[in-house]
Image (cartoon, rainbow, N blue to C red):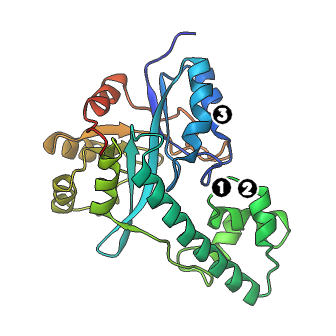
Amino acid sequence: MTRTGAADLHVHTTHSDGACSPCEVVQAAANISLGALAITDHDTISALAVARPEARRLGLELVGGIELTAEHEGRELHVLGYFVQDEAPELIAACTSIRALRDDRVRGMVDRLRALGLQVDLDAIRRTFPRATIGRRHLADWLMRSGQVTDRRQAFSQYLGDDGPVQVPKPRLPIAEAIGLIRRSGGVAALAHPPYDLRERTLESFVAAGLAAIEVNGPGVPKARGIRLRGWATRFDLVPVCGSDFHANDRPGRWLGSITTPAEDLDRLRSGCPSPQ
């Protein structure tokens, strides 16, 4: 099979909030002839060990990735890590801690849903998504499957949204800490889906902390916005990366491989990897 060389560098699996297993996303990437795939699950690298043998079998480059939940000045941001080591001990320990805090968060949301009269069985949800870090999407799916809301959108608009009655804040790392953690794990740190009101001087501070790449194209990014982000990438010598932010096949515009990074930019990322500490 002829590979395109292009890479989808933003993909989620059932190990966080995606609908497809690690092997399924690898197989799908191979079927559309991608040259490389980065699995970037939220706050976990557990999918990599599962996906690695299948990627080798199919001749697909699997980039070890992660999407860390971070914050800056009280605002949530996400940091992508590329080429992190599959068994980076400090990263695994940090993810384990974040996962424990997320369990506390989910239990808090479940308690609030029950206080509103909804029926939520957290043990059943965990059995349904045995490898996932349970989050709001899984609670929304439960409410939908149990007939307590008509669809996921209603679950978020009525209960689970950022301003909803059951929302509990996520555990988040200071962004400099997230960047450093990725670098110490042998990876390259990239700012995921930069906010529309991101200031240039704020980005400069992230670069000073070790940020080496920035996501310049993704779902819903207007052309003018992408041009501006690419300009910043050039100014700060950041690698421009792109990805579909794939979670499930039912999200138009976010299908696997719909937005990709050229091979030459993937090579730049690879060459920027520090030695793991």
Q: Is residue 75 above or below residue 82?
A: below
Q: Amino acid at mark 1?
A: Ala
Please tell me whether mark 2 sits on a helix, a strand or a loop.
loop
Position above or below: 266 against 128: above
Q: Is residue 106 above or below residue 92?
A: below
Q: Earlier in the sequence, mark 3 or mark 1?
A: 3
Where's residue 136, x and y in %? 63, 67
Where is mark 2, residue-wise?
Answer: 129
Badge 2: how crowded within 10 Å, few (<14), some, or many (20+)?
some
Q: Are marks 1 and 2 in contact (CB under 8 Å)?
A: yes
Task: Tell me the tag on residue 76.
Answer: none
Quadrant location of residue 227? top left
Q: Residue furthest bottom?
A: 115
Badge 1 is on which residue? 132
Residue 52 vs residue 221, the one in the foreground: 52
What percent of the width, then of the height, locates residue 277? 29, 46
Residue at 63% from the left image edge and 38% from the top image edge: 22
| x then y, percent, for residue 90 | 40, 54
Residue 69 position within the rendered picture, expressed as x and y whole percent measured from the top left: 43, 61
Instruction: Report the residue at 58% width, 43% height from top.
Output: 47
- Report the residue at 58% width, 75% height from top: 105
How many angstroms separate mark 1 from mark 2 (CA)?
5 Å
Label 3 residue SS: helix
Instruction: Say what amino acid the circle numbered 2 marks.
Output: Phe
Residue 23 is tagged as 3
Task: Give amino acid for label 3.
Answer: Cys
